[in-house]
Each structure stands twice: as C-alpha cells, then as structure tokens.
Amino acid sequence: MMDCFKCKRIGLFLGGVLFGTAGVKILGSDDAKKFYINCLAAGLRAKDCVMTTATNIQENAEDILAEAKEINAQRYQEDVFEDESGEETPEQTAEGLKEAGTAPADTVTA
C-alpha cells in the first residue's frame, strides 16, 4: 500500500518537472516573444488613447469652471447695479468683499 502512494508522488513530481520544462521552452520561444511584444504594443496604444481622453476631459472641465465663474461674476455685478440708490459702495463691490474677507453666496472662489 505504501509503495503505491510513493510511486504516485514520484510520478506527480516527474510530471510537474516535465510540464515545467516544456512550459519554459514554450514561453521562451520566438512565437511567444512576438505575442508578448504585440500585447505590450497594444497596451501602450491603449494607454495613449486613455491619456488623450483624460486630457480632453480635464480641459473641458477647466473651460466649464471658467465659464461658471464668469456667469457668477456677471450675476453679482447685475445684483450690485440693481441697488435702489444706483451707487456702489466699497462694501458692495467684489473687491470690497474680498478685502473684508466675505464673498457673495453665488460666487465661486478658488
């Protein structure tokens, strides 16, 4: 009985060695190297595509932020000029608010 298990273990070990040796030969072949090179080239192309897309998204986000700030600045200016007295006081202007350390609720500050 013990002899059978011993033979089975030796057989599995030798099979693993043969499989490993064959695997190393296959993975080191010229065809396999061409496959690796093509996979790496495809990965680099994909990286370039993703980076281009990410750059475009970032530029669009910056444009949107700039336009939103402009809209808020215009709305604030319209609110200031709608004052009943028609005169601006330094506290009402954007510069006066910045100096005082407060900003209107609808303006975006960076």
Image (cartoon, helix red, strand yellow):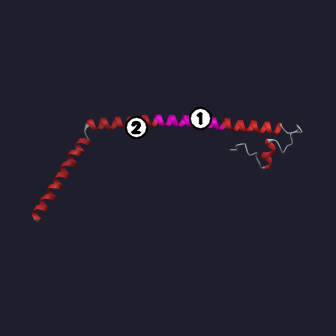
The residue closer to the viewer here, 81 or 10, is: 81
The residue closer to the viewer here, 60 or 20, is: 60
Residue position for label 2: 43
Q: Is residue 15 magenta?
A: no
The label shown at residue 60 is 1
Helix, strand or loop for the magenta stretch, by majority? helix
User: Residue 51 appears at what percent x and percent y?
Assistant: 50, 37
**Amino acid under label 2?**
Gly
User: Residue 50 appears at what percent x and percent y?
Assistant: 48, 37
The residue closer to the viewer here, 31 or 61, is: 61
Which corner quadrant of the image does residue 33 belong to? top left
Magenta range is 48-65
Q: Which element type, helix, strand or loop, lies under badge 2?
A: helix
Which corner quadrant of the image does residue 58 belong to? top right
Which corner quadrant of the image does residue 6 belong to? bottom left
Compared across the picture, whether 3 is left or right of 98 comes to left
Q: Earlier in the sequence, mark 2 or mark 1?
A: 2
Compared across the picture, whether 80 is left or right of 39 comes to right
Q: How packed is label 2: few (under 14 Cα within 10 Å), some, or many (20 or more)?
A: few
